[in-house]
Amino acid sequence: MSDALAVYWDDRRVGTLARNAEGTMLFCYDDLWLADPAFRPISASLPRQTGPFSRAATRPFFAGLLPDEEQRAAAARAAGVSAQNDYALLDALGGDVAGALVIVPEGQAVPAASGTAPDPLTEAALAALLEELPRRPFLVGDEGIRMSLAGAQPKLPVILVAGAPALPSPGQPTTHIVKPAMSRFAHSVETEAFAMRLAAAAGLAVAAVEPRRASAIPYLLVERYDRSDAGGTIRRIHQEDFCQALGIAPEHKYAIEGGPGFAACFDLVRRTCTAPARDILRLLDAAIFNAVVGNADAHGKNFSLLYRDDATVLAPLYDLMVTAHYPEVATRFAMPIGRANQLDGLDARAWERLATDTGLGAPFVRRRVQALADGIREAAPGIADALAHEGCDPDVLASLVALVGHRADAIAAAL
């Protein structure tokens, strides 16, 4: 394991992640980065500062780059390190992560991206990799591959070559994410594809998704919004999730466990976004959408800030689901709406309290709830038809249409 890790923003060094004598992970900005007139912090929770940040300040951002729950444990087993050792996991996985950062062992240069496109994976080869992901997340141990994404679901960052997924060459930013069907939740590909496409139809900004198959394995191909194509050159765009920005450790992502509620999220948008009025409305629409479709799992790591060159904005939505489709999933909201903490507990008072959290008027919020409920109900059948033509299970889609239609009617009636 490396004694220190160098942290780069693309090819510019921004700081060092090191362990002190007690083994505590600490981050310190590089003096040249601090002196640069164009200095930008890597996180809203890590502002300009000389000298190292404390562990309490360092850990939420950097641990937030790593996988969660069983995927974290599996990655640690594959790497031969402790699942509680954030530093060792970043040493093993921190090459291509969410946002613009690249983390490499001290003394190593950031790998230069090859100008040669890798070979696309055959369907059989991709299927074999997807079957291995639960045991070896992000292909830990393969030479030249160091990559990580947050979340508890197995996933594989890739690039597309002639429309087909391919493993990146060393140093090459990935552009898409392959999310195979989850064994715990039947038809998770259909459920996520439906929720994501429905959100887009309702006017929300979301990551583009496409349901596909690798042999017998269904998967969802997700386009990364933290990458851009500048004349054939892929650039990383910096981003962080709300837990990282608020300095909240990933294991506390749910409000009931110390994670952010909507008041803290709207305050974060108000403080950090370049056009806060616009992004407050976008976050309000996201909260309403999740409530209407029955997504109780919209926690603090499922919303992000995107740091473009010219503006800080609320990132497109990702990881949308219809958790109400699964009876075994808890119905408690990851973030309560007002005092309502259950999917079926929404009434006019809950929306009035959310209006207080947003700083918007209650009549306006009620109108947005009504408008989105109507839009979701009207768009759902067309989304289901389109996904059925793309190979998704029509019976599952019909069930989702009925569920969100019923919820839209009930929520609108309770206003």
Image (cartoon, rainbow, N blue to C red):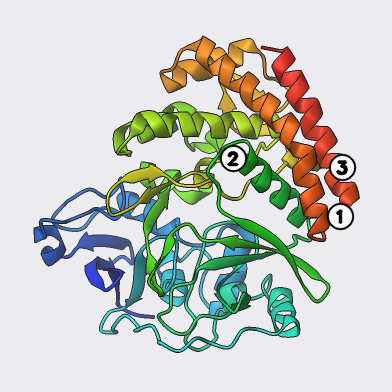
How far from the left and from the top, in percent, is residue 179?
66, 63
In the image: residue 201, left or right of residue 356 = right
> In this orientation, which residue lies closer to the viewer: 40 or 133?
40
How far from the left and from the top, in percent, is residue 223?
55, 61
Task: Report the quarter where the C terminus lies.
Answer: top right
The residue under label 2 is 298
Please tell me how crowded label 2 is: few (under 14), some (14-19), or many (20+) other residues with Cα within 10 Å. many
Type of the residue with mark 1: Asp
Q: Nearer the viewer, mark 2 or mark 3?
A: 3
Give the alpha-carbon distance from disc 1 to disc 3, as whole Å: 9 Å
214 over 212 or under it: above or below: below
> In this orientation, which residue lies closer to the viewer: 94 or 87?
94
46 over 213 or under it: above or below: above
In the image: residue 402, left or right of residue 235 = right
Type of the residue with mark 2: Ala
> In this orientation, which residue lies closer to the viewer: 247 or 306?
306
Task: Report the quarter where the N terminus lies.
Answer: bottom left
Question: At 33% from the left edge and 38% from the top edge, which residue is drawn?
Answer: 273
Question: At 81% from the left edge and 48% from the top edge, which residue is drawn?
Answer: 385
Q: Are marks 2 and 1 in contact (CB under 8 Å)?
A: no
Q: Nearer the viewer, mark 2 or mark 1?
A: 1
Please tell me how crowded label 1 is: few (under 14), some (14-19), or many (20+) other residues with Cα within 10 Å. some
How far from the left and from the top, in percent, is residue 248?
42, 44
> In this orientation, which residue lies closer to the viewer: 155 or 227?
227
Q: Secondary structure at mark 2?
A: loop
Which of marks 3 and 2 precedes in the sequence?
Answer: 2
Which of marks 3 and 1 precedes in the sequence?
Answer: 1
69 over 32 or under it: above or below: above
How far from the left and from the top, in percent, is residue 313?
38, 43
The residue under label 3 is 398
Q: Secondary structure at mark 1?
A: loop
The residue under label 1 is 393
